[in-house]
Amino acid sequence: MEKTKDKKENDLMEKIVSLCKRRGFIFPGSEIYGGLAGTWDWGHFGVALKNNIKQSWWKKFVDSRRDMYGIDAAILMRQEVWQNAGHVENFADPMVECEKCKKRFRADQIEDKNKCAECDKGKLSEARQFNMMFQTRVGASEDSSAISYLRPETAQGIFVNFKNTVDAFHPKLPFGIAQIGKAFRNEITPRDFLFRMREFEQMEIEYFVRPEDWEKYFEYWKDEMEEWMEEVGFDMSKIHDIDIAQEDLAHYSKRTTDFEFEYPFGQKELFGLAYRTDFDLKNHKLEYLDEEAKDKIVPHVIEPTFGVDRAVLALLLSVYSEDEKDGEVRSYLKFKPNIAPVICAVSPLLKNKPELVEYASTKVYALLKAEFGCVAWDDNGNIGKRYRRQDEIGTPFCIVIDFDTLEDDTVTVRDRDTGNQERVKVSGLKNYLAEKIS
Ligand code: ATP
């Protein structure tokens, strides 16, 4: 019974990885040279999906609030940032090595601590700490002052701009700074598609509060995070908030709640919420002048953090569906219309009828493309094939221009989930779709 379930779950991951490649969402990094572990490249629809997730996040947490400021900090920062933040010393995972085949594993992720899972023969070494920051050099100098790191989290780019933000905008507590950007970790064992990558993206908020208010805002941000997850369309029955035990907390945190997702390979972290105390501002010797109380304090920090790539993976797993249509199994992605990479596909019923192609192209496609951008043109194969293709991309609506259109200016709009079709006036199409998106 367990075995059957495992197989089904593995099959699901395989189906999703293969759909992502086939339909132009996500490709293995450096593939034509044999691949580079822990890296993935984003195709046309993957970029669109990722952008929609990021935009929805930015809209909710930055644009629609008065107390949030955006930042886009440089990935390369002076080495002092990472020294003072504690990362040079502490940003490490325990690693063991097989004495025979030399394969390395994360010590806290292996089942059998005595034998290598790769060659099944070698003994494993004692665990040692492996720092996960990618080191690089800035400029032509060879000496150690030129050392820098690709940032392993976006958070420090926010902290080092705390003073700039306060000086520029004079925000009152509580307020937050938000950033979306790349992060890099030299993970010992990258695996499970987008789950554990070496180059990935984060969406992070550092929310600065008075020290005595931290518990109140911790609870507040937990609710906000859940609200956004629901809005995006994650399967909430697969998300569980777990309080991390004191002994497992990161070096900067006094309390952390992880939002874990039931992936096919186990229940693991999707997003996190951490109380970082005044750890970071103190490390960077930063403080805040309370203009009313004429008092200097070091604010405390609540950090909601979201991985973009894990969000994409958990969303794909949430929306992937199969049913039977016309005696065949069809697979489709049940994205909400505002998150789907393509809002609709426009199709002339027959591609060898110039009058249909002309109408579809000038009166429908051009109109919708100008309005929504994410509109596909699809005239390849018969209508059934086009529907299947668009279902797999997760396109919520397919619009077909047929001979009746030429007579009465109406088109067929077919719904992805139900397969139902209705006739809609071309003049009402923009509103029809705008309503669905909102
Ligand atoms: P894990 O315990 O799984 O390694 P973490 O606790 O180290 O994760 P954080 O440092 O809290 O992760 O990073 C914030 C967010 O960034 C995570 O919630 C996750 O969504 C994302 N993230 C972290 N590491 C990776 C990775 N290697 N690949 C993809 N996303 C990641």
Image (tube, rainbow, N blue to C red):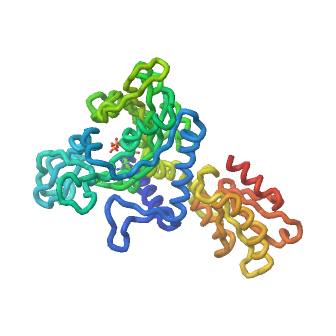
Q: Residue furthest right?
A: 407
- Dividing the picture into quadrants, the one containing residue 412 is bottom right
Determine whether 249 is above or below 25 in the image. above
Going 60% across and 38% down the picture, which residue do you hit?
A: 64
Residue 224 shows in the view: yes
**Above or below — where is 224 with respect to 36?**
above
At 25% from the left and 58% from the top, the residue drawn is: 137
In this rendered view, identify the residue nearer to me: 45 or 139: 139
Residue 241 in the image, given as x and y percentages of width and height: 43, 33
Q: Residue at x 83, y 68 (%)?
A: 405
**Residue 44: image location, x then y, percent:** 53, 64
Query: In what quadrant does ligand 1 lie?
Result: top left
Q: In the picture, residue 289 is in which quadrant?
A: top left
Residue 292 or 181: which is nearer the viewer? 292
Q: Is residue 285 above or below residue 377?
A: above
Residue 77 as seen in the image, left or right of residue 201: left
Q: Nearer the viewer, residue 288 or 420?
A: 288
Answer yes or no: is residue 195 visible.
no
* Residue 400 as seen in the image, left or right of residue 127: right
Coordinates of residue 436 in the picture (x, y in percent) = 71, 49
Total tally of numbered discs in the picture = 0
Q: Residue at x 75, y 76 (%)?
A: 357
Taking the image as shown, residue 242 lies to the left or right of residue 368, namely left
Q: Is residue 247 left or right of residue 225?
A: left
Q: Position of residue 184 (x, y in %)?
A: 34, 52
